[in-house]
Image (spheres, rainbow, N blue to C red):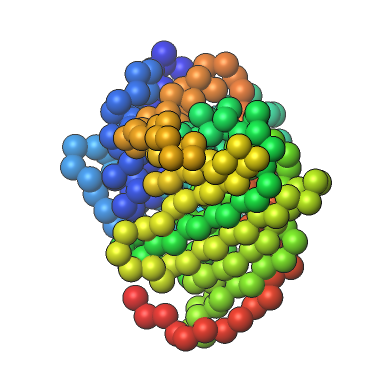
Amino acid sequence: MSDLLRIAIVGFGEIAGRQHVPAIAKTSGIALVAVVDPAKTPPGLPHFRDLQELLRDGPEIDAVALCTPPQVRHVQAAAALAAGKHVLLEKPPGSTLSELTPLITAAHEASRTLFATWHSRYAPAVGPARQLLAGRTITKVTVIWREDVRVWHPGQAWIFEAGGFGVFDPGINALSILTEILPHQVCIRNAMLDFPSNRDAPIAAQIELTDHSGLPIHAEFDFRQTGPPSWDILCETEAGPVTLSKGGRQLRDGNRLVVDAADEEYPALYRRFVALTSEGKSDVDLAPLRLVADSFMVGQRRLVEAFED
């Protein structure tokens, strides 16, 4: 393999163009050499309609970044690993928990890297929040994650199909931060999931979580918010509130602003991916996905008005 990690993006949607392409360009040791998408053809790069065409006829690559809907990622990841390629999985890493285990095994047997990315964990205030909370007694946690699906996922019908996660597509970002900053493992107690009458995935959810100490954690996810999004986690502690806002870009300790930084999540992801491939390691944390699966398992289903994009 070349010293430069040659990567292809598979699935050239909005996130791929807005986040992955500039992040790769900013990261040393990696280069974007091809794109796979059945319809979109970004200028200046070799383009292929599907992964098999890329593997058969494309330029030499060392890795793929799978940015397709989660329903199809398992087949693509398995094919890429079988072809000897490293694999980066956009979040969520798949539609089910069970499909990830054989991929982990396949990556190990092929001596290739499998990286299940949780980009929100790389937001600039998340690490400082974890350190701040490590020295505090947390008494209550409230998660508010609301956005306008028409703004953030315009025309993406797959997100409301079975396996598309619905509001848990952004909600899993909150869960990835929650499982990173809290000192103990959390679990689902109960959930109420709002399903539009014409869709197969929820548009909103209210979830109660806890840990072994009984810490009350309440989470609200909603795709129906208009105007600016609300991506906030409030941790009440014996020393006052600790608040993560703006999806993990801003941190307040009480009224004191601790961190307020620009979004550099995806460049950090790619630096991590380059490091993992050079070290011959994988990184597949399934904790956020497990919480989503448990929410569907124990959640009550409530029908709400039909949703039309």
Residue at the far top in the pictured view: 3
Q: How many marks?
A: 0
Q: Is residue 114 above or below residue 277?
A: below
Q: Position of residue 206 (x, y in %)?
A: 60, 67
Residue plotted at (43% across, 24% down): 271
Q: Is residue 306 above or below residue 2?
A: below
**In this picture, residue 149 sits left or right of residue 302:** left
Residue 61: name its quadrant. top left
Residue at the far right in the pictured view: 212
Q: Position of residue 270 (x, y in %)?
A: 42, 29
Residue plotted at (47% across, 67% down): 222
Asked whether the viewer can see residue 268, the reply is: yes
Residue 3: name its quadrant. top left
Residue plotted at (62% across, 59% down): 218
Q: Position of residue 109 (x, y in %)?
A: 69, 29
Residue plotted at (60% across, 46% down): 236
**In this picture, residue 216 sits left or right of residue 254:** right
Q: Position of residue 205 (x, y in %)?
A: 57, 68
